[in-house]
Image: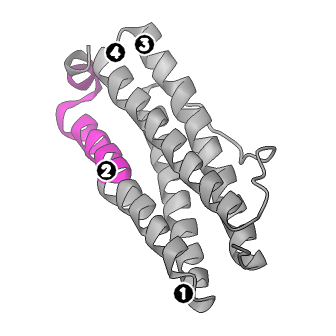
Amino acid sequence: MKGNTNVIDALNVLLANELSAMDQYFIHSRMYHDWGLHKLFERIDHEFDDEKGHASALIERIIFLEGTPDMTKRDAIHVGHDVPSMLQSDLNVEYTVQKLLKKTMALCEQEQDYVTRAMLQQLLDDTEVDHAHWLEQQLNLIKLLGIQNYLQSQM
């Protein structure tokens, strides 16, 4: 099915962001594993898998719309140097993806591509309800408990 060029282009922008998020989560999860923070490793490794699923959904939709997925572009990743900066970097990525998802969903409405919009709604739900909310909670826990107590709870 021939899709709208503007929608395909916007999906490729989203794809670049999801691939960047995937790379950043991958690096952070391995750092947590190396540091012995096994609970953080498991959760962030799960987020890595979720981002891979988001990228896969975007790739499949772009192909369905007879576009070409652009796997060569990535946004800059920001690898943290400690747990709070890593969590904040990941949260910043989620906020960026959230804004792009909403912008692309509005474009889909304008172009009357309601199936793509519905797919993006699921990605937005994952981004807002699961990913960003959990990261916000962790940063709040660090403030409430102090970094040492938080880190001990993640071993």
Q: Neighbour class for label 2 at 10 Å: few (<14), some, many (≥20)? A: few
Q: Dot 3 corresponds to which residue?
A: 33
The segment highlighted magenta reads 130-151
Q: Work out which quarter of the rendered image holds the N terminus and state it.
A: bottom right
Q: Position of residue 15 (x, y in %)?
A: 65, 53
Q: Is residue 60 above or below residue 26?
A: below
Question: Residue 4 lies in what quarter of the image?
Answer: bottom right
Which amino acid, by three-letter code, is at mark 2? Asp
* Between discs 4 and 2, the one toward the N terminus: 4
* Between discs 3 and 1, the one toward the N terminus: 3
Q: Which mark is residue 109?
A: 1
Q: Dot 4 corresponds to which residue?
A: 37
Mark 3–mark 1 Cα distance, whole angstroms, equals 42 Å
Question: Residue 13 lies in what quarter of the image?
Answer: bottom right
* Between discs 4 and 1, the one toward the N terminus: 4
Q: Is residue 41 above or below residue 22?
A: above
The magenta stretch spans residue 136: yes
Nearer to the camera, 83 or 148: 83
